[in-house]
Amino acid sequence: METEYKYRLEDRAQIRQILNDPMLDPFVNRDNLEDIRMHAVYFDTQDQDLRKAGIAYRIRHENDRITATIKWDNWVDDGLHSREEFNLVINDERFAEDPDIKAFESSDAYDVLLRAAGDKKLVKLVEMEFVRQLIKVDTGRSMSALSFDDGVIHGENGDSVILEMEVEWYHGDEDDFREVATSIAEKFDLKPENASKLQRGFAQDVSEIGESY
């Protein structure tokens, strides 16, 4: 299960403003700020069976690591995203270029994929490139990841900008995690982002996007 808040940023200057804000001083070690170069490709059948079933199949290069991820059963409320998620580290570049569902046979994700797509071939649909700045937030009651994504989505209807803040719950008290995320959002007047990056890759008008995947 993945649980995270997403917020839109108005400009890149907000990233530095938030990271340097004194409200974070007791909870972060800024020396441990990570820069992660992301290249993500989303796959589906030619008929987009996974999309219709509310499933995302992603291959993502994260600096030198490759991860295959399945997400499903998405729920969204005022920027808070919660969904089932399964991750698999990939060591074969060939698989990253031509993935299938068999790699997930030992996971709960396999039955979800099999029901939706069967043995149909997967093809590239949406691609995105961005840099993520990530720092861990440890309040003593909860641990979460505060991250800022800056880049571009190469979508079905052209390119669109990625500029957003995410706060992902790792473990600990969930109410405390929510307080961390909403306190930052309120202080900097950030607007909740109910659309995933994948949804934005398919849509021309984000306001028309539903919350199914």
Image (cartoon, rainbow, N blue to C red):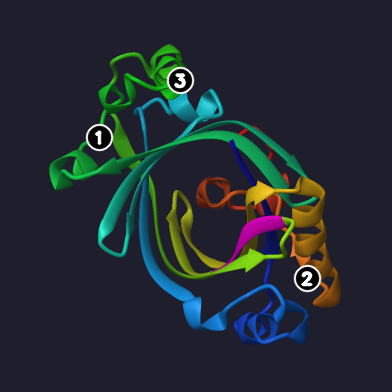
Q: In the image, residue 114 lies at what x, y percent?
A: 39, 15
Give the answer, above or below, for where 101 lies relative to 132.
Answer: above
In the depicted view, which residue is nearer to us: 29 or 110? Answer: 29
- Alpha carbon of mark 2 to alpha carbon of mark 1: how far? 38 Å
Tell which circle, 3 or 2, labels the residue nearer the N-terminal end: 3
- Residue 99 - label: 1
- Residue 107, can we see it? yes
The C terminus is located in which quarter?
Answer: top right
- Alpha carbon of mark 3 to alpha carbon of mark 2: how far? 35 Å
Check disc 2: other Cα within 10 Å, few if <14, some if 14-19, many if 20+.
Answer: some
- Residue 164, can we see it? no
Residue 194 lies left or right of residue 56; in this view the side is: right
Which residue is disc 3 drawn over?
A: 108
In the depicted view, which residue is nearer to us: 144 or 40? Answer: 144
Q: In the image, residue 66 lies at what x, y percent?
A: 28, 51
- Alpha carbon of mark 3 to alpha carbon of mark 1: how far? 18 Å
> Amino acid type of disc 3?
Asp
Kindly identify the residue that appears in the image at 25 percent across and 43 percent down. Answer: 90
Magenta stretch: includes residue 146: yes
Callout 2 secondary element: helix
Image quarter of residue 99: top left
Q: Nearer the viewer, mark 2 or mark 1?
A: 2
> Amino acid type of disc 1?
Pro
- Residue 184 - label: 2
Check disc 1: other Cα within 10 Å, few if <14, some if 14-19, many if 20+.
Answer: many
Give the answer, above or below, for where 148 lies relative to 117.
Answer: below
Q: In the image, residue 212 lies at what x, y percent?
A: 64, 32
- Residue 133 - label: none
Q: In the image, residue 187 lies at what x, y percent?
A: 84, 76
Callout 1 secondary element: loop
Numbered range of the magenta stretch = 142-148
Q: Nearer the viewer, mark 3 or mark 1?
A: 3
